[in-house]
Amino acid sequence: MTDLSAWLDARRSSVEESLRRFLPSVAEPPTRLHEAMTYSVMAGGKRIRPLLAIAAAEACGATAQAVMPSACALELIHTYSLIHDDLPCMDNDDLRRGVPTNHKVFGETLSLLAGDALLAHAFKLIGENAKVEGVAPAAVAEVTALVGEAASSLGMVGGQAADWMAEGRNVSEAEVLFIHRKKTGALIRASVMTGAIFGGANGDVRTALSSYGETLGLLFQIVDDVLNVEGDPVALGKAAGSDAARRKATYPSVAGLVPAKARAEALLGEARGALAALNGRSGVLAGIAEFTLTRAS
Ligand code: GRG
């Protein structure tokens, strides 16, 4: 087992345990709502966003435990976006993370509410990060504003709206890049910056992590677009080919599949380059960028 895969396994299992601990108990009323929230959060997923927050925090000298409530908050926000994205009024998908989508099991109304509750619960967790020993209240305030903006109409929800409004019409490469940077990139960059802020990063290190996060976000979505064209639905845990069927604005659709793969390779180089300012403390972050390019799901 390589150092990176040992690191990923250990931190992923801490994230899984923390997510379970931080979610409201399914015994707590309204039990069916709490079951719906738990169902999608605990259905698996790569946990890339919390892992990025932890990796960035550790690269800056902080511990995983110092950032864990906010790292889990990022996963709750991501899961809410997946639940809402799968609803009949949006992509109307049947399968997510290898299991039936939330609304297929709990119905549309509870599914909508489960997403809303996960978003609210995420900000409760970020606030509670202030109780962790050694965490500065100013860092919690900064992370709250950062994550709030990344999830807002200036970030993920704005990107989702632009994506929906672009469906079925011809778009430019610049428009696709705008959508990707907002819809997917904003929360990924915010995940890296959450770790950077709790790790006390300043100056060149902070700038480097911001640039790494932004580049990784775009890389992540271009690879997602490529996987939607030629990925294996079993590995993906969801249908492939849906972007073309819905005439979605994707990088391969405006640039072609081969140029999309070349752009992803180039972005990996840029992400690695951005990490130079971290002086050898960025092995895990570089490994996550490489995994983002080579992943099958
Ligand atoms: C606010 C409704 C709403 C949506 C926001 C994130 C998003 C926009 C929609 C989800 C659909 C989608 C394919 C978005 C692109 C981002 C993306 C690649 C999501 C999948 O993330 P992974 O691969 O999923 O990290 P896992 O299951 O591994 O966590």
Image: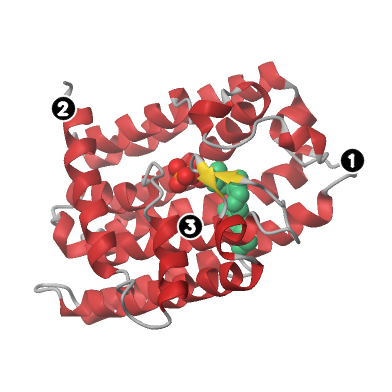
- The residue lying at 31 percent from left, 30 percent from top is 287
- Expressed as whole percent of the image width and height from the top left, the position of residue 266 reads 53, 24
Nearer the N terminus, badge 3 or badge 2?
A: 2
Disc 3 within 8 angstroms of ligand 1 (CB) = yes
- Expressed as whole percent of the image width and height from the top left, the position of residue 166 reads 82, 50
Asked if the residues shown at circle 1 and circle 2 are in contact, with their CB atoms under 8 angstroms apart, the answer is: no
Q: Residue furthest left?
A: 133
How many residues crowd around disc 2 within 10 Å: few (fewer than 14), some, or many (20 or more)? Answer: few
- The residue lying at 75 percent from left, 27 percent from top is 255
215 on left or right of 263 = left
Amino acid type, callout 2: Asp
How many residues crowd around disc 1 within 10 Å: few (fewer than 14), some, or many (20 or more)? Answer: few
Q: Which residue was labeled with disc 2?
A: 3
Quarter location, residue 68: bottom left
Q: Quadrant of the N terminus?
A: top left
- For discs 3 and 2, the disc positioned in front in the rendered view: 3
Please, what secondary structure does the residue beneath circle 1 have?
Answer: loop
Nearer the N terminus, badge 1 or badge 3?
A: 3
Nearer the N terminus, badge 1 or badge 2?
A: 2
- For discs 1 and 3, the disc positioned in front in the rendered view: 3
Whole-angstrom CA distance, mark 1 to mark 3, is 28 Å
The circle on residue 78 is: 3
Whole-angstrom CA distance, mark 3 to mark 2, is 27 Å
- The residue lying at 25 percent from left, 58 percent from top is 201
Q: Which residue was labeled with disc 1?
A: 170
270 on left or right of 23 = right
Amino acid type, callout 1: Asn
